[in-house]
Image (tube, rainbow, N blue to C red):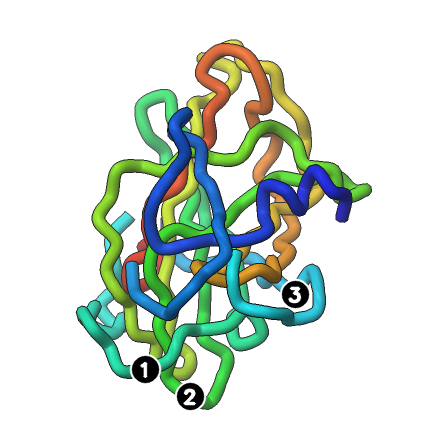
């Protein structure tokens, strides 16, 4: 992964954005909280390191505030991308994080996300954050949480596009990303309505 990709994905955090509205991922200082079935599985893009930076399904755990469980670390999660949900000129995808550990843990806030090419170079700017209110999502082993990723359809917006090889997903409050193969076509990287947006994590898989 190049320095440009890492710059957009060093961390993901529970709240806050910069003055331009772009998603920023400062290092975490604590473990405070916050399309249909996923079709692709992510694997760690780097070795786990130091912590920093749709509709929920019926089988999902209840969102809790002030959960006692520890934060989920990258090494305990699997990332995947669900099937797109069509909208009026929009493309919407659930980014799904599934707890693969044998303990219960929590996620809260916005994940980090960046499209990259085959060499690991980031394509386009960091996503912007939707104005959501984070809540803590408690994940028992095998349970999932999801965040929405959306952008205007390039054929309608006229934005300049690129074809990513992968999406790097950094769980909230973590530094190490998970790499998910991107198979959903070209994405906007510059020009009119080229912004990619992210929502906070919520229970379920987005379907």
User: Which residue is painted at 29% across and 64% down in the image?
Assistant: 33
Numbered tag placed on residue 168 in the rendering: none
**Image side of residue 49 versus residue 199, left or right:** right
Quarter occupied by residue 85: top left
User: Residues at badges 1 and 2 in contact (C-beta under 8 Å)?
Assistant: yes
N-term mark: 3 or 2 = 3
- Nearer mark to the viewer, of 1 and 2: 1
Relative to the observer, which residue lies in front, 84 or 114? Answer: 114
Q: For numbered disc 3, what is the local secondary structure? A: strand
Residue farthest to the front? Answer: 29
Q: CA distance from mark 1 to mark 3?
A: 22 Å
Q: Can residue 60 be seen in this snapshot?
A: yes
Quarter occupied by residue 183: top right
Q: Which residue is mark 2?
A: 103
Q: Which residue is mark 3?
A: 44
Q: Which residue is mark 1?
A: 69
Q: For numbered disc 1, what is the local secondary structure? A: loop
**168 over 20 or under it: above or below:** below
N-term mark: 1 or 3 = 3
User: Which residue is painted at 36% across and 66% down in the image?
Assistant: 107
- Measured from the top left, where is residue 86 in percent x and y? 36, 34
- Measured from the top left, where is residue 176 in percent x and y? 61, 61
N-term mark: 1 or 2 = 1
């Amino acid at each position: 992964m190049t320095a440009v990709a890492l710059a957009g994905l060093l961390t993901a955090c529970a709240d806050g954005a910069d003055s331009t509205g772009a998603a920023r991922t400062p290092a975490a200082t604590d473990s405070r909280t916050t399309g249909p079935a996923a079709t692709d599985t992510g694997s760690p893009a780097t070795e786990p390191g130091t912590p920093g930076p749709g509709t929920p399904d019926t089988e999902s755990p209840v969102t809790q505030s002030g959960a006692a469980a520890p934060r989920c670390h990258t090494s305990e999660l699997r990332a995947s991308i669900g099937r797109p949900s069509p909208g009026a000129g929009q493309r919407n995808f659930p980014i799904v994080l599934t707890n693969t550990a044998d303990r219960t843990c929590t996620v809260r806030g916005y994940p980090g996300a960046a499209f990259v090419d085959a060499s690991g170079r980031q394509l386009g700017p960091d996503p912007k954050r939707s104005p959501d209110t984070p809540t803590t999502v408690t994940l028992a082993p095998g349970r999932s949480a999801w965040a929405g990723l959306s952008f205007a359809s390039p054929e309608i917006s006229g934005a300049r596009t690129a074809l990513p090889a992968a999406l790097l997903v950094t769980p909230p409050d973590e530094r190490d990303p998970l790499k998910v193969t991107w198979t959903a076509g070209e994405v906007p990287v510059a020009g009119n309505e080229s912004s990619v947006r992210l929502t906070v994590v919520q229970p379920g898989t987005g379907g």
